[in-house]
Amino acid sequence: MAGHPDGLRRIKIAPSLLSADFARIAQTIATLETAGADYLHLDVMDGRFVPNITWGPKIIADLRPLTRLPFDTHLMIVEPERYVGDFARAGADIITVHWEATVHAQRLLNQIKEMGIRAGLSLNPATPLCVLEDILSDVDVLLIMSVNPGFGGQKYIPGSTRKIAAARRLLDERGSGAELEVDGGVHLDNLREVVEAGAQTIVMGAGIFAGGEPALALERARAVCSR
């Protein structure tokens, strides 16, 4: 891991519930918590910023009593400033918005923080890191998308690894405490590559749920991260 020898930073795994079977969601969440998941990643999609539609604040509020795991809430929606309060009240612990979806990113990040929520900023694959120049100090979580957002199960974009490594260098050079998160197409076969590039938190959807044994998949992911 660039600048951080293995063992000095524990890698966090955030299973994405977008890939889970919602008919068994309570059992699935309990299984993930017992298996040692660090966060639950909740993908909120509006059918406008991305072509898919998922869930809103009510679903998140209904899930909140099921677990003490932090809710890593990823808003893939236009005008997120209109809704962050609803998601905070629903029980989000981290609210991540897209740089591409809001005109006033710095204002929005601080709006989220004022509600006592960690503020995340996500960058699409085509968005360069230079947009962070004047707002990096306001970011608690930097989410690098390694697929184009909108659907689970997509293939990892190979060039993402260079971007993750560049983001790691930027954070270290600036002395930023922002958590570097990666989302999109991460499976056991490329997980180590993403970790070695400098990611701290890995969102895994199909990589956890596709085999039908999320606890086992999480255990295997942990083993890969600890090599």
Image: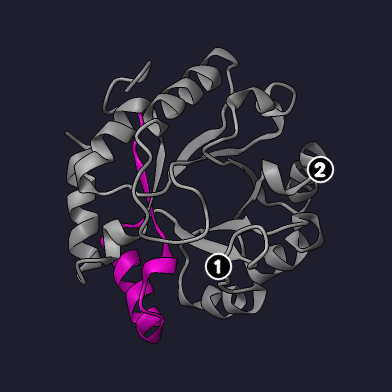
Residue 115: percent from the left, percent from the top?
76, 54
Provide residue 45's location: percent of width, then percent of height. Answer: 60, 65
Say which quadrant the C terminus sits in.
Answer: top left
Q: CA distance from mark 2 to mark 1?
A: 22 Å
Are there few (<14), some (14-19), or many (20+) residues within 10 Å of tag 2? few
Q: Quadrant of residue 162?
A: top left
**Residue 26, placed above or below residue 82:** below
Residue at 69% from the left image edge and 21% from the top image edge: 133
**Residue 168: % across, % down:** 47, 23
Residue 138 circle label = none
Q: Is residue 141 magenta?
A: no
Q: Earlier in the sequence, mark 2 or mark 1?
A: 1
Number of residue marks: 2
Q: Which residue is mark 1?
A: 52
Label 2: which secondary element? loop
- Residue occupying the point 24% across, 56% down: 218
What residue is disc 2 on? 103
Front one among 61 and 160: 160
Q: What stretch of residues is rendered in magenta?
A: 8-37
Numbered disc 1: secondary structure? loop
